[in-house]
Image (cartoon, rainbow, N blue to C red):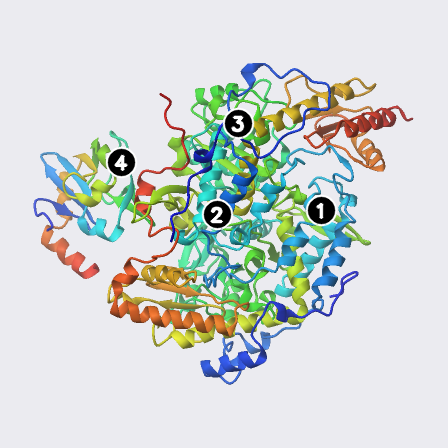
Amino acid sequence: MAAMDRRLLMERSVAGRRAVTVPEPDVPLTPLPDASLLRDDLLLPEVTEGEVVRYFTLLSQLNFSVDTQYYPLGSCTMKYNPKLNDEMASLPGFSEIHPLQADETVQGALRVIHELQEMLGEITGLPGVSVGPLAGAQGEFAGLLIARAFHEDRGEGAVRNVALIPDSAHGTNPASAAMAGLEVVTVPSDEHGNVSVDDLRNLANERTAVFMLTIPNTVGLFEPNILEITKIIHDTGGLVYADGANLNALLGLAKLGELGFDIAHSNLHKTFSTPHGGGGPGSGPVLVTEELAKYLPAPIVSENDGKFVLGSPDRTVGRLNGFQGSFGIVVRAYTYIRLMGLEGIKAVARNAIINANYVQSQLKDDFDVAYDRFCMHETVMSARRQKANGVSALDISKRLIDYGIHPPTMYFPLIVPEALMIEPTETESKETLDAFIAVMKKIAEEADASPELLHSAPHNAANTRLDEATAARKPVLRWEPEAAD
Amino acid sequence: MTLANSCSGGSPSTFIPNTDHDQQAMLDAIGVADFEDLVADVPEAYRHPTLDLPPAAHEMSLASEMAALASTNYIPGDYACFLGSGAYRHYIPAVARKVANRGEFMTSYTPYQPEVAQGSLQVAFEFQTMVSHLMGLEVANAGMYDGPTAFAEAALMAARITKRNKVVALDTVDERNIEVLRSYSHYQGIEIVRASSADLTVPNDAACVMVQSPNVYGVIEDMGAVSDAAHAQGALAVASVNPMSLGMFKSPGECDIDIATGEGQSIGVPLGFGGPYVGLFTCKDSYKRQMPGRIVGKTTDTNGETGYVLTLQTREQHIRRERATSNICTSTQLIALMVAAYLATLGKQGLRETAELCYQKAHYAASQINALPGYSLVSDGTFFNEFAVSCPKSSQSILDALIQRKIIGGADVSNRVPNGIVFALTEQNTRAEIDRLIEALDEIGSMS
Amino acid sequence: MTPDDRKYSKEHEWALVTGIVATVGITQFATESLGDVVFVDLPEVGSSIEQFGKFGEVESVKAVSDLFSPVSGTITERNDAVIDDPEVVNKSPYEAGWLLKVELSAPSEIDDLMGAADYDKLTAEEG
């Protein structure tokens, strides 16, 4: 790859250049406050508009993205993001309204929130919905606060302080539980990649506030004992929480509420096609049964005689962010569901599941499958066979970059050694999957024949492998001006 | 589900490429007769539930339906808008908006594979550079959800550092910030104590003192005095600031604040009815390992070329799980990019001039309103771009009357000040708009 | 080679006793399973620690491990060189990469630790 000019903005800055001019005041001037209150200097770049455009455009080209590459990153649901979503979110009537405007001046916006609440409730079978939480992790936190409030109202707040969490869970589950003041007790998985029901039965008791389960689970499998699992927890008086990270596999296929889940969150940036943005903004609506709706975080939108109002549920767990959530993301998810409609939503799970099983079936001779059974929307494979020859999941991932494909999620879940988690999503065609399968087979051959090719990959990206150890030992976290002499 | 005015007739095939024929070929290759064989683990009685959703909409029809819906909202710009109190209507130059819309930025994931995410990573490093220097503190993370959550997480961080659990918040901190702090700290055993900003006393078991500047009345707080009072009791000083005000006012770092946070909306993010925004989070270098959130660091690759990576990751949930500094796993990167592009575009001169323009407009408006019969400024402290006014009639009746005149008035603070309204101004409020507001207030105030 | 002048715990720490003071560190096996050490968190001089109790943390890029003390006593010295340059722990776990010096409060506890041969047997099973 040709050398690129990677200089930072401050290294491009030339005194006196500017990218925008600011009008002169059109009001009589007031003296500025005393100099002791004012700052002397601002350390910001001085560049022209053209330089701003070229710099950020150059940087954008250093990214792999769904718009430019196949991106089978497991558990992240990197599906295509319809462009109408973004256009609707930037309509002036949505993007330029102030969050504190009176309800009667923002009826259109409140209608969108209300209708999305209804649609998410219908899709998941959990009718109490707040779209307030700003990300999946915040939705989780909200859900756990709801569980705690529910137990407190029943006089069991002090004793029910344990969150049961499978060993295969995403790290946010225990982290959110800790923020909600819950003690984390880990539930082992069995040899088929399911929750060990016997262990769960032994661990569930009168201290269980909630069992947090990702469904399908993080190895891409649907818990065959799901009805027994929800019953075990309910019999002890606990609640069952669904981490909706993998909800894409269930769109139109099953409803969380009907399976016995009491609380869930959904990631609009995964299942409902809003852009991941390079790591946010997300949106993590929290969904609950009718019984738990009075605890939802504030605010939610309700309808009275055709008028929409923002309000707080009776026993709300409170406010989790400044205003009413990621409204721009809410508009995008709403647009997506409307474009897909009933037929489209039903087709999502079917296509996502066929695609994942197709990839798994075509690669299982070349790579180990973590659990050899049909998967849901993603397959977890393992490079343990290649590891015997010194080639790791990391090496395989980096080699995929050379072929213009974004690597799968690697080393997660933690219970699978050398994990490669592949989620094709429903928006990829058979041709794309066939091309990916061919590349993976080629890499499997290379792992045998020329492992050094993989150890030194990637070869044609913006950078070769980066030294993360030095970055952590001697952190350089910003540009600094050279010491003045 | 029937929606008002809903359109239909579209097809999901626009996003799902595999035809029935493709799907059958893949099922054959998998070796199953039917899709149902793949989902046998889902209890049969629960499979394919009835679903009440509207039919698919044509893009063209939906676009026009939603445009009509959006236009029913009262849009600042069409209406003169003097509402602030945490979100401000600043002008965002076209170039800053354009670069943030690149698909390569929009549709990538968190940079776990740094070699193919250098764009996002270098942007985050730029964001950290500009935000940390703006705040006057050594370290900035790559972004939080929003201002209030950043402020709340700062309190949790101060409690971890000092191993104390009493958080002292000045009584001039906006209630929204306090409500979020309450939700975040409730199960952490943290006690929130409100303290008078006029007569601050800090208990000797306080983890931190929390100040907001400009405060809920728009007044610039003496952050230096807050730091001194906190440090004297072994507590940290935590600030929430409006970053636009830092275009001219002293930074938290210059006032010896330990952790400074802010709502990034005012520097490059559209109002958007409250989000998505980005939280700014900065601290002194010695506290960086207790920070929540993503942090990007500079390093080199195997060829010695400069590149960027996520760093200090052992603080985070994917490694430390229940002992992580926070459960957050986003940096709200796309919005951080908007902030970086905005600050790059305004630059050294532009940010200062914009801040001063806000200051001038607000001071003109304040002096004119203060001269109206029945209206008076609540505080004589130094303010930036917003100020509280005590009005001759109920805040609600004044705001209602203003809407009739196509003016979105300020925020109702009658819970704090009798008949109180906080008005905010930005560089986008013209003199004509301001004069129209003054005239309307005069007229409304004198009506019997 | 595992030095046989000192004793080892199951948690992969070592203790080298000279008089009433033990020097404490982590084993080569531990550094190899951690990978590149990027940060070491150690307690202050003067604080006391207990045998098999947690006293600090050692971090690699993507893992955190608790440190468990092989002995009880009061910390008399801390190796700030490994805090400034954590790589020393990888390069020289048994010499320059030591972590703490501890004045023993219960010297007989040393008998609860393993010799080099037993420790090698343990790591052969784990590794």
| Mark 4 touches mark 3? (CB < 8 Å) | no
Residue beneath label 1, please? A92
* Dots 2, 3 in contact, CB < 8 A: no
- Give the amino acid at mark 1: Pro
Label 2 belongs to which residue? A58
The answer for which chain carries disc 3 is: A
- Secondary element under disc 1, as helix, strand or loop, is helix
Please check whether the numbered discs 3 and 1 fall on a single chain.
Answer: yes
- Asked if residue A370 can be seen in this view, the reply is no
Q: Which residue is mark 4?
A: C83
Q: Which residue is pictured at 64% across the width and 22% down the height? A: B383
Where's residue A248, x and y in %? 55, 65
Asked if labels 4 and 3 share a chain, the reply is: no
Are there few (<14), some (14-19), or many (20+) residues within 10 Å of tag 2? some
The residue identified by callout 3 is A16
Q: Nearer the viewer, residue A109 or C52?
A: A109
Disc 3 vs disc 1: which is toward the camera?
A: 3
Quadrant for residue A189, please give it.
bottom left
Tag 3: residue type? Gly
Q: Determine whether A213 is above or below B334 in the image.
A: below
